[in-house]
Image (spheres, helix red, strand yellow):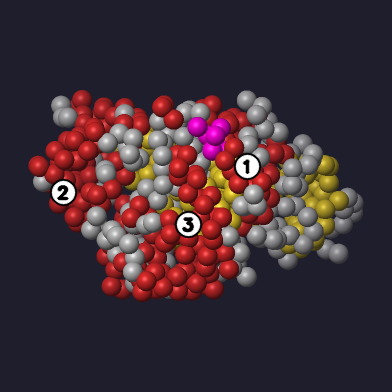
Amino acid sequence: MAYDIIIRDGKIITGIGGPWIYADVGIKDGLIAKVGYLGKEEAEKTIDASGKFVSPGFIDIHNHSDLSILVYPAAENYLMQGVTTIVIGNCGFSAAPISPKNIEPYKSYWSQLVPGLPVEFTWRTFSEYLKTVEKAKPAVNIVPLVAQGTVRIAVKGLEPGKASKEELDEMKELVREAMEAGAFGMSTGLIYPPGSFTSTDEIVELAKVVAEYKGIYASHIRGESYNLLNAVKEAIEIGERSGVSVEISHHKAAGRDNWGLVKKTLEMMEEARRKGIDVTCDVYPYTAGMTMLSATLPRWVHEGGIGKLLERLRDHECRKKIVEYIEKEVKTWENIVKLAGWDGIVISYSEKCKECEGKSIAEISREKNKNPYDTLFDVLIMDEAKTTMVIHHMAEEDVITVIKHPLSMICSDSWLVPPKGKPHPRFYGTFPRVIKRYVKELGVLRLEEAIMKMTAMPAQKLKLNNRGIIAPGFKADIVIFDYNRIEDKATYDNPRAYPTGIDYVIVNGVIAVEEGKVTGKRAGEVVRKR
């Protein structure tokens, strides 16, 4: 048998957690054809992996490239990390379905999350969106989730309040259409409107539809700080009442007062599993997060959409009410101002204040001789709320606790980025950082455990039955890396630095990275759940 590619003499990490083995890997027609000694077998391309590790391609289980994949399908910041598959539609935001009657609040919401993307919204249904992604010819595999927030916007816009029976039935039908089109599950973002306007009962009804298709429920839970325990309890309850498989997104405890609570939440997940509730979590290997700057504002400020939000910020009396609410209601919502402090809120992208990028609200306020609240409000008004921030509010000890736990897997919580702004370093360094920091430096994970959390575990969770493992018959998504050289180079000050040590990345049997350089070949697939 003549192979397309033979990888010779590598240290094979299969992805399932066992010790690595010396072997060759033969690839044919996009699949792994053989793992073992291939001797004198021939191939069109032979890769010498002597002294290097060969693992399944990394799967990013929590990603936000729904729109950016259409603009930057080459996906270089993921390929260079060894990522071959990304799971999109997280935190309650998916690119479909779109209702013509509510397209404006939909557009304005995406403009906050991923600002500055020149995307024309030509699709309406989930199926049409997936076909649009296929036409873009992505370099990585795309695994889609449908988002509860997007579904609710399609039916109810950004208005708060309980959905009527008719509205809920319409939402359920949209979720069903997405699952039929190939979605792997549904996500929520319960600190963001309209997720924050949504009751547990409403989510359970939608999750029941997802459960019929054996999909997952991925949730940015209703609170990651003072409400963390109740929020995890709610996620578990949704799993128990609906029968859906639960994934708690980017699990953390935000704010010094809450550090250490992840020990309790992980115990809660373990107890739930003993009761037969399928719950797991994912985590990124950093102590800072990133989201929209508008997330600093109370929930009621978001009611009615971006236009209303900006009206409120321009109103002097309303500004006073917002300040009073943030100062007074410290523990009743995700109060980022109090959790991180003004020094911990750093502007990562601003359309109109480029000199603000990479600076904290405290630093900008000192430079402009302004009150920090006025700085916050003025930047949001200036950018029409299209501003993103990096938030420093976590503890390294908590990251270690979650990352080494058997129920956690690795995510980046990022997206394909344009060549501007100062994004979080996780956009460029997440997966190599896990190996460099938590395997090599701290020793809290074995290498094989770390690889399993990036490959077989997310594949198993999603029921990606032919990816995430190096074995015959599986898709040839493969990474070859040098353990001695693998290192994340991206920092908060210099976030756009590619990692080192990732020598080859193969996507569906096609070499996408060769000798540390992107080849330009785009062999990714839009994967549909069947």
Please identify the dominant SS of the magenta region.
helix
- Provide the residue designation for mark 2: 312
Report x, y in % for residue 64. 45, 53
**Residue flagged by tag 1: what amino acid is it?**
Glu
* Residue positioned most to the left: 316
Question: Considering only order in the chain, which callout, 3 or 2, is on the residue closer to the N terminus?
Answer: 3
- Label 1: state its secondary structure: helix
Judge from the rendering whether residue 207 lies leftward or rightward of residue 356; answer left or right.
Answer: right
Identify the residue shown where x is 31% and y is 73%: 100
Per the image, the residue denoted by label 3 is 187
Mark 1 or mark 3, whichever is nearer to me: 1
**Nearer-N-terminus badge (2/1):** 1
Labelled disc at residue 270: 1
The earlier-in-sequence mark between 1 and 3 is: 3
Look at 74% across and 42% down and name the residue there: 17
Q: Position of residue 277 (x, y in %)?
A: 61, 52
From the viewer's perspective, is residue 55 above or below residue 443? Answer: below
Residue 519, image x and y in percent?
58, 53
Magenta range is 261-266
SS for dot 2:
helix
Judge whether 329 appears above or below 187 on screen: above
